[in-house]
Amino acid sequence: MTTAQTAAEHTDGFRRVHPLTPLLRFWTLILAVFAGLVLNLNLSSLQAIWSVLREDTDLAIWPLVASIGGFVLACGLIWLLSRIWWKATGFRLTDEEIQHRRGVLNTQLRTARYDRIQAVDLVESVIARIFRVAAVRVETAGGTNSVIEIAFLKRAEAEELRRQLIDTTHARRAESQPVQEGFGLSEIGSPRVMETPVGTGRQVVPSIPIMRTLGSTALSLNTVITVLALLIIVFTPLGITALVPVLVGLVPSVWNLIDKSWKFQADLAGDILNVSYGLADRRRQSIPLGRIHGVSMTQPLLWRLFGWWTVSVSVAGYGVDTKQGGTTRLLPVGTKDLALHLVEVVGPLDDGELETYADPTRITRPTYTSPPQATWVSPVDRKQQGVTLVGEAGGVGADTAPRAVIVHSGRFYHRMALIDVSHIQELTLKRGPIQKLLNLSTVRLNLVPGPVSMQGSDLTYADGMELLTVLRRRSLPELTGPGPDGENRAGTVGYD
């Protein structure tokens, strides 16, 4: 049975979403109203209700009956209005695009061409899981606010719609865009992409143990700051009013760490990395390896006690990691060996090259490092800062075209990032006033929006100019101008 057969349709071909969608979208408001009513049931209200139940004739029950009747009438009115909104909401798949329509007074129609789709994710919020429904999020090229969410559908219908979108995108791109050598591994919908459910491909990241998730969250910087702030508030005369901004600002970030690493697992099927995670909002996400650009491996200070690391990536078309968007952390917490294995899977270097050039704890064979005078501007991290260029046959010098760039930084917060040089968008050489006095410079590698940032910090001016020259010789895809993900293929160089 297909989605078209199971979903209700409008007369113009738009399929309706689940009838509970309006109420599920506003469930937090409904819950807040209900909680407010419960909290306002004081002792006198309870006594009045009890008197009514005992048939106390001396009690004027009409105000109570009117209140209950008004509440029921309001609920009925909300339900009626939600049905009107529901009937005006729908989606359909045409030969060229997916369309999503909503709104009664102001109708909004959003579309996404199949050749612009970057990823199709299945999202199950905590309230959606109770009613066995799910949302389908279509990530498209275009940056901010470029997501179309089809919410909500029965879970089986949502899974079928997701498969249908991926298959259609696959077929459409196979017809219009032959795979080019040197253009990453693949894109969603390329001839080599096959959508496979989590758990059926080669396991890359096994399900993260719950105790490891809780332990890593407890040792994270956000949690430590939250605990310290609470202790200061409790043991100082700041008062309870100071507690509110702390809870509002820090607790959601701590919860986000738990939610996005809860039972996280990843499997590799062909050139697609399928991940599944979530405590409150369960999510299934497919990430094409060809869309992964920068890769970083980091270790917070307190995680050294257990040897834990995290791996993050910048994915073309995804942007920064947000609550509504997909995750860009491919390993929320794991051992060093597991993190390096994942970097090998999604990055440009093999296992041997990672062992030789990319030890995340220290610089092994750097091409450029910060000179002694950089101690004045970076006294703590100076000896940990370095840039390593890797060529086709291993290490690379100033006269050899590089294939990949590795950047090390951080003494207390270990960080190693790497990227295929073809994914570098722009190059910028920066020199601040103090750097000019010390004959230093910083070369920034501009990448697609995401959590991974890379720069050669506090190099000598000569090394900075040399690095700039070497990276300008990098091999670039044949495409010029904006690609399907909105990125600039040609790349530019800037001076600041």
Image (cartoon, grey):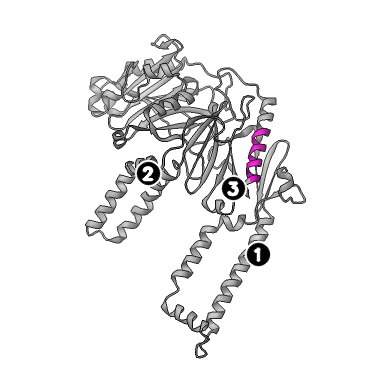
- Residue behind mark 1: 80
Q: Residues within 10 Å of mark 1 (few under 14, many from 20)?
A: few
Amino acid type, mark 1 = Leu
- Vertical comparison of 201 with 88: above or below: above
Residue drawn at point x = 44 percent, y = 45 percent: 259
**Element under label 3?**
strand
Closer to the chain start, of discs 2 and 1, is 1
Indicate the quadrant containing the N terminus: top left, top right, bottom left or bottom right: top right
Which numbered tag is attached to residue 444? none
Indicate the quadrant containing the C terminus: top left, top right, bottom left or bottom right: top left
Q: CA distance from mark 3 to mark 1?
A: 23 Å
Q: Nearer the viewer, residue 225 or 159?
A: 159
Q: Give coordinates of residue 105: x percent, y percent.
A: 66, 57
- Residue behind mark 2: 214
Q: In this image, 225 relative to 42: left or right?
A: left
Q: Nearer the viewer, residue 340 or 473?
A: 340
Q: CA distance from mark 2 to mark 3?
A: 27 Å
Q: Give coordinates of residue 338: x percent, y percent.
A: 41, 28
**Element under label 2?**
helix
Amino acid type, mark 2 = Leu
Q: Which residue sits furthest bottom?
A: 58
Closer to the chain start, of discs 3 and 1, is 1
- Vertical comparison of 420 with 113: above or below: above
Residue drawn at point x = 55 percent, y = 44 percent: 123
Q: Nearer the viewer, residue 124 or 93?
A: 124
- Residue behind mark 3: 134
Where is residue 374, by image quadrant? top left
Magenta stretch: dominant SS?
Answer: helix
Q: Which residues are magenta?
A: 156-167
Q: Residues within 10 Å of mark 2 (few under 14, many from 20)?
A: some
Q: Is residue 160 magenta?
A: yes
Q: Nearer the viewer, residue 406 or 213?
A: 213
